[in-house]
Every structure is written in C-alpha cells, then in structure tokens.
Image (spheres, rainbow, N blue to C red):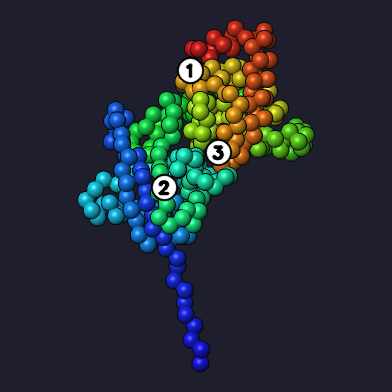
Amino acid sequence: MQTTHVTTAKTMIVRLKIWRQDSPKDAGRFEEYTMDNVLIDMSFLEMLDELNEKLLKEGKRPVEFESDCREGICGTCSLMISGQAHGPIRGATTCQLYMRSFKSGELITIEPWRARAFPVLRDLVTDRRAFDRIQMAGGYTGAKTGPHADANAMLVPKDLSDRAMDAAACIGCGACVAACPNASASLFTSAKITQLALLPQGHPDRKRRALRMVAQMDKEGFGSCSNLQECEAACPKRISIQNIAIMKQEYLKAAISADYREGLGDADA
C-alpha cells in the first residue's frame, strides 16, 4: 500500500530594517531584525505581529504600527515598504500584501509615510489628521436628508455615476502623499472634490467646496502637484489623476466667479 506524505507549509527567512522612533521629537533610527520559519502565505501584518510577539518575549518594546479592518478597506495599515507605498503589489494595501511576494533572506526596509504634513508619532505611526481637516473643509454635501426619494427622481448619467464612484473609492490612506516627491495631497483632495462635483447632490456647494478644500490642503503644508503620476501608481484603489484636472477646473471656475471673495474668506476663517 502506497503511503501519502503531507507537504509542510513553506517557510522563509525574513530580514527586516525597521524605522524606530520613540516620540515625535525623537530623531529616530533604523533597527534590524531577523525572523526564521516565516510562512510564505502569512500576510505582512501577521508577520509584524509575529515579530512583536518575539520582541515581547525578549523584553523589548514592540514595533508600533496601525491596522484596523485588515481587508484593504480602511487604509490605516499604510507603510512604506522597500521604497514603495504599501509594498510591491500594485492596487493593494499593506494588509493585502503577503510574504510570498518577497524572497527568503531579502532585506525588507519598513518606514512610515514621509511628509511634513504627516508627522511621525511613534515608529511606523503617523498623524494623518491633515486629511480629516481637508475633508471637513468642504468634502460634504448640503443635500437635505429625509425619506428615501424615488430612484428616478434625480437622473444621473451612467458615465458620471461611474466616474463619481471611482473617485469615491479613495480610502484616504495617504499613499499618494508618500509616493509623491513633493508630498502633494492633490490626488486625495481631487477625489473628494470630484465625487461630489459630478453628482447633482454636490452642486449646491460646488464652488465653495473647491475653494475651501484647496485652501486647507495648502494650509496643511502639502506640496504642489508636478504631474509625475507617482500618486496614481501607488494608490491601492487606483484613483485616476484625471481627478486632479477636474479639481483644477472646479477651483478655477470658483475663483473667477462672483462668489470668489466670500468663498475664500470662509476658507481662511
């Protein structure tokens, strides 16, 4: 009788070079770690969990990093991995990255987002509340809520609804900022402006929204867009840079309108 042999899961050796920073005022430094027998089908965040378990057993401080849904939805797992935002797999967040994407023994460098507007709080955790402030400056609609309207009460062309949904897919992770040499937030801001500009529900505040959100983006200290398209390449939701062109159109229309002074005054308030 022939016996069957169960193949054990493949493992790999992982070499890590991780940014460690105790506080926002700390200069920070890189530290290297080696892990043996890491499963190749383990997610990147599970590998970091294993590293932290190892560090705790050794009486050392674990590596601080953020995560929540671990399903590519929330964007909080944002990491710069070997010079690429979210890692080498395009169209995926860090939590959707698996260790089989790396070679055994390869040195993997892990850093936080690098941008003046995203200060490092500790290790790999950055303060991305600048995005929240841009959103609060105008990324909402003044449409009244209440009983659900009939689906055909406000007709929206299919091409516009599709483009609005594509823009609304932005999860605000900040990969666009991290990948941009200028640390520009234009892709994020433009996605939030475009998704409402294309829909009738977003038209009442259209001009004021563009003025306020762009003004807030500049106020936060983000750089300007130089059209290098690194943001689109790094975006896990593949947000198109065409949204940046729409944002500039929206801003220009608002700036030359009769509401310019009032809208800009509100933005600066």
In the image, taking residue 166 as reference, residue 20 lies left or right, namely: left
Q: Is residue 27 above or below residue 44?
A: above
- At x 42% / y 63%, what residue is drawn? 11
Q: Estimate the x, y position of residue 252 in percent, counting from the top left.
A: 66, 15
Q: Residues within 10 Å of mark 3 (few under 14, many from 20)?
A: many
Q: Estimate the x, y position of residue 245 in percent, counting from the top left.
A: 66, 24
Of tags 2 and 1, the one toward the viewer is 2
Does residue 166 show up?
yes
Where residue 195 is drawn, which disc sits there?
A: none
Mark nearer the N terminus (1 vs 3): 1
Disc 2 target residue: 108
Disc 3 target residue: 234
Q: Estimate the x, y position of residue 39 in percent, counting from the top left.
A: 43, 61
- At x 66% / y 37%, what residue is drawn? 165
Mark nearer the N terminus (2 vs 1): 2
**Which element carries disc 3, helix, strand or loop?**
helix
Disc 1 target residue: 219
Towards the viewer: 247 or 3? 3
Q: Estimate the x, y position of residue 75 in percent, counting from the top left.
A: 50, 41
Mark nearer the N terminus (2 vs 3): 2
Does residue 49 show up?
no
Q: Residue furthest left?
A: 59
Name the amino acid, label 2: Ile
Check whether the beta carbons of the residues at disc 2 and disc 3 lie within 8 A of each other. Answer: no
- Where residue 240 sits, quadrant-wise, is top right
